[in-house]
Amino acid sequence: MAKFAGGVHPAGCKQRTAGAAIGVCPAPEQVYIPLSQHIGAPARPVVSAGERVLRGTLIAAADGALSANVYSSVAGTCRGVIDHITASGKKAPHILIENDRSDESVSLPPLAERTPESVLARIAEAGIVGMGGAGFPTAVKLGVHGRADVLVVNGAECEPYITCDDAIMRAYPQELVQGIRLAMLACGARRAVVGIEKNKPEAIGSLRAFCGEDVEVRPLRTRYPQGAEKQLIYGCTGRKVPEGKLPVDAGVVVVNVHTAFSVYRAVERNEPCYARVMTVSGAAAGRPQNVWVANGTPLRAVAECCGGKEDCARIVLGGPMMGEPVFSLKVCTGKTTSSLLFLDASECENKVATPCIGCGRCVQACPMGLSPTFIEEAVFAKNYAEAKRFGAESCIGCGCCSYVCPAKRFLAQSVKLAKKIIRERKV
Ligand code: SF4
Ligand code: SF4
């Protein structure tokens, strides 16, 4: 097994939710469905205030080549497009739908045949995006016209606490392998490799029962960030993606487990992407679990379902390494919302940065071979050309540098800032 350099080994903290059946979060009275749940242009609303919609009605259409359709997750009445708070603290357009509790739904029309073109078109029609967090429209990613011979499926789930992909692999292995084969058909890959960290033996066993010569399960060592794109490709295929290039330049396309499962649902069950499984965990979550959640559900409703305490030490959307703190439970879920953590004081560190002692641990831990401490110095000096020279643009935001720093420096944040400024100012 090809091992990537660097990385860290944080405590997994997955025991609270691993192994249990997937629950269902009741759909709330109102859903606020974001028009932008993906990379690219926000979707364009196609429903008006007062219009009745069903679960599965198209409410906003992809606007351009890099965008994604958005569907209603409940049956009810559209109350129009409103600006609603997002995890970043800024407001963005959402479609507000009042749930009438009729639970009426509508499906996509059945596919007459399974060809690369028809499956790709269905993936686009269903509004599927990268559900591991990136939100890249999946039809665009898979539309590589035979330039990839391997599909790598990301089942590493290396972030502490998060177990939703593990839950899908254990609960729906046959459906997932069907989704993987459909994704292979869409992108023209001859084989697929599912990368799963070795700490998920049940998922490895469940999937292997349905794999053949075309789909292989590859157990990977448990080391963060094993699920980062370049590290995963290396672990699954031994191929290195050249600096500044895309996975397809190494003949690879990567999709996440939940994304492949959504491909199955769209093609075989004619269900567009309007709900997902997410992990709710942390010591301040009374009933930690993996749950199906309708897109557009306010986090408060998810918290009520899982006993999340609003007055806990920190609420995090995503994992503890790469996630973001949330300051309002009015924020709503979307296609990329993989987890919500309610952490108590014992799980959070209130860091006070002290001067760098030059130990070099951040350099050893960086999986991209960067020198975070030098980039931080360049940021403090506002010398972004120097930060670029030190490779800030290659940072994958994994947070390993901050995690290992004994001086508690905010290295990952500094490198992220450098990357943002280099891009914005075209340094
Ligand atoms: S510099 Fe970026 S890629 Fe390297 S460890 Fe820090 S966050 Fe990760
Ligand atoms: S890990 Fe922290 S203390 Fe050590 S060299 Fe890097 S920034 Fe300095």
Image: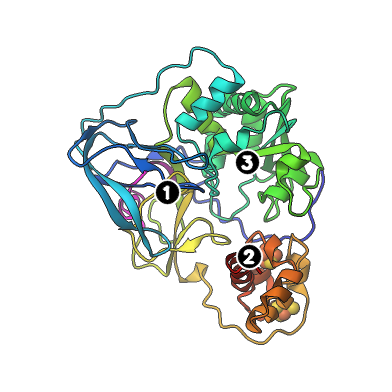
Q: Is residue 198 left or right of residue 59?
A: right
In the foreground, 115 or 310: 115
Badge 2 is on which residue?
A: 399
Badge 1 is on which residue?
A: 36
Badge 3 is on which residue?
A: 155
Instruction: Name the quadrant containing residue 400.
Output: bottom right
> Element at badge 1?
loop
Q: Ligand 2 is in which quadrant of the figure?
A: bottom right
Question: Could you tell me the amino acid type at mark 1?
Answer: Ser
Residue for point 40% across, 18% down: 109
Q: Quadrant of the C terminus?
A: bottom right
Instruction: Name the quadrant containing residue 216.
Output: top right
Instruction: Mark 1 and mark 2 in contact? Answer it, CB < 8 Å.
Output: no
Q: Is residue 111 left or right of residue 399?
A: left
Instruction: Look at discs 2 and 3 and give the one toward the viewer.
Output: 2
Question: Could you tell me the amino acid type at mark 3?
Answer: Gly
Q: CA distance from mark 1 to mark 2?
A: 26 Å
Q: Residues within 10 Å of mark 3 (few under 14, many from 20)?
A: many
In the foreground, 247 or 358: 247
Q: Which residues are magenta?
A: 288-308
* Residue 125: percent from left, percent from top: 46, 29
Q: Is residue 33 above or below residue 192?
A: below
* Residue 54: percent from left, percent from top: 27, 30
Q: Is residue 290 magenta?
A: yes
Q: Quadrant of the N terminus?
A: top right
User: What sort of colour scheme is used for the picture?
Assistant: rainbow
Q: CA distance from mark 3 to mark 1?
A: 25 Å
Instruction: Look at discs 1 and 2 and give the one toward the viewer.
Output: 1
> Element at badge 2?
loop
Q: Is residue 303 magenta?
A: yes
